[in-house]
Image (tube, rainbow, N blue to C red):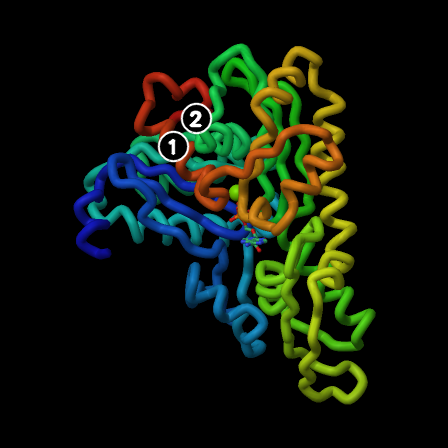
Amino acid sequence: MAETLLSFAGQDMAIDLGTANTLVYVRGGGIVLDEPSVVAINSQNSKALAVGMEAKRMIGRTPASITAIRPLRDGVIADFDITEKMLRYFIQKVHRRRWARPRIVVCVPSGITPVERRAVEEAAYHAGARRAYTIEEPMAAAIGSGLPIGEPSGSMVVDIGGGTTEVAVISLGGIVVSRSIRVGGDELDTAIIDWIKKEHNVLVGERTAEQLKMAVGSAWPYADEPSAEVRGRDLVTGLPKTILLSSPEIREAIEEPTQAIVDAVKFTLDKTPPELAADIVERGIVLTGGGALLMGLDHRLAHETGMPIVTAAQPLQSVVIGSGKCLEEFDALHNVLASSARP
Ligand code: ADP
Ligand code: MG
């Protein structure tokens, strides 16, 4: 890995700064980094102890002196200092040779403020960018999913991330209608925790809830639904306890946030100009982001909207692939990027 990284050093890179995962794409080299957007901080001196995969393993398992932080958790930059530390760490991990100044494209949640956007650019400049650009997530996801964004034709993309769901209709290289809600995969995890607490008097951790969602979670019934055993703490006895949970139970647990995602799609469709809506009927709504992997979400959306639904080929990678394409085809696609000059 180190060798591959070195041979790409100095080259332009695109970064998907997600609420759950950060991915880095190097021009000419594809995706070279894919790690959780988590930083473990020593609360005594505010120093970063671990970033990415290593830090995620610490969630729910830290002593009082260490906190595992997800700085972008709700789709806004909750903690700017830590976001910057994380971004610089990932850039430097890929970009070894300081003298070579790359172009850096950072994909940001569309809900961030101009000040936050500027701050992300500055972090990229600090990390050695020759020029820093930002791109809005739904645009990157659409490009990465192969939608014809430059044509006078409507495309709808639904990107379900960890902290947010972004729905957008794109035509002629611009976002025509969009809606961003602070409901994504995390909210499903929280709903599972709350439901198990309420129904079984057992407390399970965040990571357990996420694993349960991936293994048996669904938004629509399907054949041979599995069950899963989970371990948590019995809230009555205080002792560890194992319980068996079925797919329909987990479906019930996540119903509220699932419906919120469906409603965001319906709301956006309702606001879409009729010509563009007709294009979407033909092409289908493209689902992307890790949340698109929830079993049966495509069926559920098809049922509730009456539209054809297409799940992206690589939901967790569409955004970084789309941002990377902006580097590969810079002349054709730089119009979708925003940038202010080096400070
Ligand atoms: P972000 O762009 O916000 O970083 P991602 O697109 O990386 O988010 O998606 C992360 C979310 O996708 C997490 O909430 C994760 O639990 C969820 N996810 C990943 N795989 C699956 C799966 N197989 N089923 C359901 N949810 C999934
Ligand atoms: Mg994302």
Residue 285 spot, x, y in % from top left: 60, 30
Q: Secondary structure at mark 1?
A: strand
Q: Residue at x 54, y 43 (%)?
A: 289
Q: Is residue 64 or residue 207 the one in the foreground?
A: 207
Residue 211 falls left or right of residue 34: right
Q: Residues within 10 Å of mark 2 (few under 14, many from 20)?
A: some
Give the residue at x 47% y 20%: 148
Tell me if the residue at label 2 has its CB under 8 Å from ligand 2.
Answer: no
| Residue 132 circle label | 1
Q: Nearer the viewer, residue 211 or 284?
A: 284
Question: Label 2, on which residue?
Answer: 339
| Residues at marks 1 and 2 touching, judged by CB atoms closer than 8 Å | yes
Give the position of the C terminus as an image quadrant.
Answer: top left
The reply to whether residue 45 is visible in this rendering is: no
Spatial CA distance of label 1 from label 2 is 6 Å
Q: Quadrant of the N terminus?
A: bottom left
Q: Amino acid at mark 1?
A: Ala
Q: Position of residue 54 (x, y in %)?
A: 42, 66
Mark identifier at residue 43: none
Amino acid at pointer 2: Ser
Residue depicted at x 43% and y 25%: 340
> From the viewer's perspective, is residue 325 above or below residue 214?
above
Residue 102 position within the rendered picture, expressed as x and y whole percent measured from the top left? 27, 35
Q: Where is residue 215, by image quadrant?
A: bottom right
Residue drawn at the location 63% of the way across and 71% of the way down: 228
Left or right? Give the position of 165 relative to 260: left
Which of the marked residues, 1 or 2, is nearer the chain's N terminus? 1
